[in-house]
Amino acid sequence: MPLKHNWRDFQLYVITAGGCHPGRELVHVMEETLKGGAGMLQLRNKTGSRQEVLREAKELRALTRAYDVPFIVNDYPDIALEVDADGVHLGQDDQAIEEARRLLGQDKIIGISTHSLEQGLAAERAGADYIGVGPVFPTNTKPGRAAVTTSYVSEAARHIRIPFVAIGGITLDNVGEVLAAGARKICAVSAIVGSEDPARVCRSFLEAIRSAEAGGHAIRIRLNGKETTTSAGNVAELVEQLGQGNKRLVAEVNGMMIQRSDWTSAALTPGARVELIQFVGGG
Amino acid sequence: MLNHTAERFADRYSRQIRFAPIGQEGQRKLLNSTALIVGCGALGASLAQHLTRAGVGRLRIADRDYVEPSNLQRQVLFHEADALAALPKAVAAAEKLRGMNSGIHIDAFVTDVNRHTLGPLIEGADIVLDGTDNAATRLLLSDACYERGIPFIYGGVTGAEGMSAVLVPGETACLRCLIGDEEAGGDGESCDTAGVLSAAVEFTASLQAIESVKYLTGNRSALRGSWVAADLWRFSLRELQLPKPSESCSHCGTTPAETSIHVGGPSYPVTLCGRDTVQVTLDEPLELDRMREWFSRLGCEVVSNRYLMKAMLSPDHRFVLFPDGRILVQGTSDPEEAMRLCRRLLPAGALR
């Protein structure tokens, strides 16, 4: 069953890590990530039996189908075929891309982890559909592998033509650096599935990615006394982004009240102090 | 008799006159001024009390509503007896105010303030004070004030929050520029949904009253040029600097008005914000005597006084009729339903 949209549009890639959420069902945690807007989901289970991986693959296939999100299986092309996954993800030590392609056919997605520009270009030549670029930061998910830092991200942004996903130790705190280096697709594992509220974390990642995509104009402002990151360029956009467009508000920027008709011309600059206050109308 | 009273109360304003920025001259100006207070609920009653005691010479109070038990917690001029008698707020307020100061002239108007009724009320007023509870009437008042070059003293209160601003034609932007037009969002939380504390009312009314006294005593340079937003519960108080009039605005700026556009004003039928009440305005006055007979014959319990008549239609619905042709349909916020009730229950020909 083909996906209804172009899988290459995904912005946030999530990977399972059962060990990050003891006591919570894999399928429930992963459904949370889909509710939060994850656009690609990979099953990675390096320790379970084939039987267990197959069972998880079946469950996640059904789940991702309901959300129309591509489903990728790490390592097991045979399981990918059996559950009709959308593709497989390979490591540098796994079978070659060409071999996986022969097995899966032209329509399946094949991705591969790369740790240098050389490997990235080689994967592209070998017919990979996307590459993972990382680990950007040191990570417990792949212990022992040296971080490639954001410099490989910048190189990938310049030289890789197929979709590339930055991965490895990415959290909401450091995703800004990765985006600044040129990544527009992000994969996070423990930061998402290890959190109390995976859906909310996904939404925050997407917000960061989208504001970077909007031209990297995300700035820090002080909104009603709280530090806030926003990609809004002016008061009107800010009110819209906050979903407050239907309320009667008064707006202040740096101590000055802003006339309603000037909201679109009232530019927000880094560090601006903005107050949005509900008009008080009782009497 | 009056002279006698005046003599007895010769010292009435002495403490106010002793306040240097006011003095004899300021007091004289105050006694020579005319203020219009629109809405005599919580804010309006407190404002009226401040201005009456301060000695504003002519006070006009306009309100469309009547006193109910739920008003007594914060509307300082009303007594239990007013609620039991369902007296119109303007009438009940004027009676108390006259007892506080017989040396000034107080006019009470039991009326909806809209674009048809505002003209005579605002004629000759030096200042307009906001005691209303909805954005549409405030916008109407702001427009009218800017048209006539008189200041509009906005105040609003909900919960423990209050806001106030002195809007002066030629000096500050008008309310329409600041909060947007009638379509720019709902009225938000109202006192009926979020409650309201009397101390927050008094705080906000004080902000309005002090600026009014400054203006009317000729202390214009002392006017506070900011929009105040206060939360008395968390205690926070913000002052937002008010912008200048907007060139492109037809009210506070220099752009001529588009005459084809009618601005503001609740018209017919209008839902009263958060009140579970719709106000229907008839083209003609209502004869209360005739209505009392009519509704009694329909089997409704009827309560009436000189100013209004209440008819209990059902446990959930009632009509409150005013001689000026207004009917408050209580127990619904749906204009359609209100109109259906009016069509069904009023004498034929009342609704055209």
Image (cartoon, coloured by chain):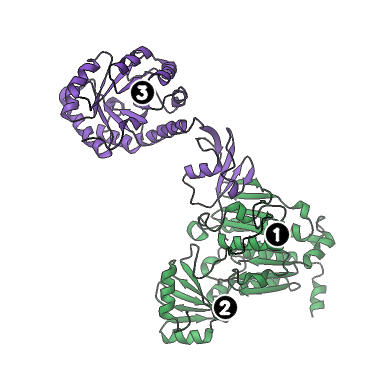
Closer mark to the observer between disc 3 and disc 2:
3
Kind of residue at disc 2: Asp
Q: Nearer the viewer, residue B310 or A263?
A: A263
Percent position (x, y) of residue B263?
Answer: 59, 63
Q: Nearer the viewer, residue A79 or A19?
A: A79
- Kindly identify which chain the residue marked by label 1 belongs to: B
Q: Which chain is green?
A: B
* B213 with respect to A98 (left or right): right
Residue B6 against residue B21 in the figure, above or below: below
* A14 with respect to B234 (left or right): left
Colour in which the image shows chain A: purple
- Kindly identify which chain the residue marked by label 2 belongs to: B
Callout 3: SS: strand
Percent position (x, y) of residue A85?
Answer: 21, 30
Callout 1: SS: loop
Q: Residues within 10 Å of mark 3 (few under 14, many from 20)?
A: many
Which residue sits at x=56%, y=39%? Answer: A225
Kind of residue at disc 3: Phe
Label 3 and label 1: CA atoms lie apart by: 63 Å
Is residue B331 visible in the rendered image? The answer is no
Callout 2: SS: loop
Residue that numbered label 3 is attached to: A164
Percent position (x, y) of residue B315?
Answer: 40, 74
On whether disc 3 and disc 1 are found on a single subunit, the reply is: no
- Kindly identify which chain the residue marked by label 3 belongs to: A
Residue that numbered label 1 is attached to: B151
Kind of residue at disc 1: Pro
Residue that numbered label 2 is attached to: B324
Asked if the residue under mark 1 is in contact with the one under mark 3, i.e. CB atoms within 8 Å, the reply is no
